[in-house]
Amino acid sequence: MKNSKPVGLFVSMLFGAALCGAGAAHAAKISISCGAVGQEYEFCKTGAEAWAKKTGNEVNLVSTPNSATERLALYQQLLAAGAPDIDVFQIDVVWPGILGNHFIDLAPFAKDVVKNHFPAIIQNNTIDGKLVAMPWFTDAGMLYYRKDLLEKYGAKPPQTWQELTETAKKIQDAERKGGNDKMWGFVWQGRAYEGLTCNALEWVASYNGGIVVDKDGKITINNPQAAAALDTAAGWIKTISPEGVLNYTEEEGRGVFQSGNAVFMRNWPYAWPLAQGPESAIKGKVGVSALPKGGADGRSAAALGGWQLAVSKYSKNKELAADLAVYLTSTEEQKRRAIKGAYNPTIESLYKDQEILAAAPFMGELYDTFVNAVARPSTVTGAKYNQVSNEFWNAVYSVLSGKAKAADSLAQLEGSLKRMSRGGKW
Ligand code: GLC
């Protein structure tokens, strides 16, 4: 599964649901693209509907593919054609450098509120002095575990990947013997797409193996710690992780974990209220912690994720579209989304909000994980980031699927990145 599905498949998704604002006689219709991972679409819809009601306009929601990689391909196709169909785009934290020149500067619309957001995200979203997107929610990889099973077998949340491997194997085998032959130790995102880049970056960074390309543009990935990290992960396939993990995005892993068939899961915060929700088989049995370290000298590394809202320069209603983006990223709306959907705010003061901390305690407990999350090398590689990531996830994928040894695959990756970077200039 090296290539993503053709974008054409998703064009049908452009016919979203039109939601009318009350009494909107001469209302404009603003189209917004939203993710649909977990409860994303639902939360986007309720937020956009509230704006439509307040302003007397209409909103049209466009659902997009779950894989970030497929979503990017769809956006690139629409934006390259200068299509005015979508006014507001939900964009990944690693896309400002790739898509930024298709978006308007939001600074004039957000001048009173910019200061409320984490400065690092504002900086990330500023390209050539233009604020191309407003921060909406931030993300970091976390380890979910079955509290009940760890207790049953006298185990603690693992501090290192080695501990995770051992605990996962022990509990998986015992539970299988006890009658659940579907039980697996660890599920994560192993499909050849952007999610694998996030998982693999966490392993590599946790072994002090760097972040593929450092902040000065130097290619650092061909090193023994990185190879050790990838070899460790390759050892999980078919022992503690199903072979199918090589085709998992976020939602497939969540499905397995939430139906009670995995001890550990690597995922983003959105999975929390779902795993603990009324329809979950493991409600009340879930714990979360920072991801394990790469050995005693390693560190816990969470990939920095997150989503922003940008306004297309091809929009016919730029001001209204900007108003919607500012509304959806406001303190009130981020608070609602944090409480009900566990979407991590990009507004620092909300991490002290008692209602948020009561609904999603991990936002307080893992605060350091969120603020110290490891960024992918998207700022330094700019418009080339997706190609860099694509080379990286494919190199990792060949190791995981047993087609190459980590050391060879990383040496080859170094070569292709060097050719791409033209002497580190990017
Ligand atoms: C999450 C993150 C995003 C990342 C994606 C990869 O949605 O927020 O930044 O690119 O996962 O699957």
Image: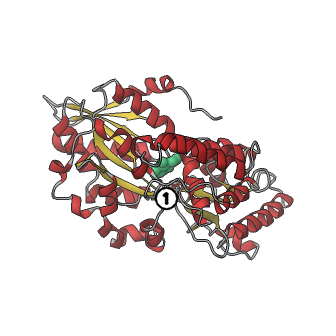
The residue under the point 25% across, 55% down is: 330
Give percent across and percent down for residue 237: 75, 51
* Residue 66 can be seen, yes or no: no
Where residue 328 sits in the image (x, y, percent)? 28, 49
- In this view, 292 is above or below 71: below
Image quadrant in which the N terminus is located: top right
Q: In which quarter of the image is residue 28?
A: top left
> How is the structure coloured here?
secondary structure
Does residue 37 sit above or below 155 in this rendering?
above
Q: Could you tell me which quadrant the C terminus lies in? A: top left
Left or right, 309 with respect to 208, comes to left
State the residue in front, 154 or 215. 215
Q: Horizontal placement of 311 versus 419: left or right?
A: left
User: Which residue is most to the left?
Assistant: 26
Residue found 65% across the figure and 69% down from its top: 147
- Look at 19% across and 36% down and name the residue there: 318
Q: Name the spot of residue 71 as percent of width and height, x first.
A: 46, 36
- Provide residue 282's location: percent of width, then percent of height: 63, 59
Q: Is residue 190 visible?
A: yes
Question: Horizontal placement of 402 versus 212: left or right?
Answer: right
Q: Which amino acid does label 1 sit on?
A: Pro
Q: On the image, which quarter does residue 345 sit in?
A: bottom left
Residue nearest the observer in this picture, 277 or 150:
150
Between 405 and 144, the one lying in front of the other is 405
- Which residue reaches farthest front? 423
Count residues near mark 1 (Cα–Cα under 10 Å), then give few for <14, some for 14-19, many for 20+.
many
Horizontally, is 135 left or right of 393 in the view? left
Q: In this view, does 50 lie above or below 84?
A: below
Mark 1 CB in 8 Å range of ligand 1? no
Q: In this view, does 347 lie above or below 105?
A: below
Residue position for label 1: 269
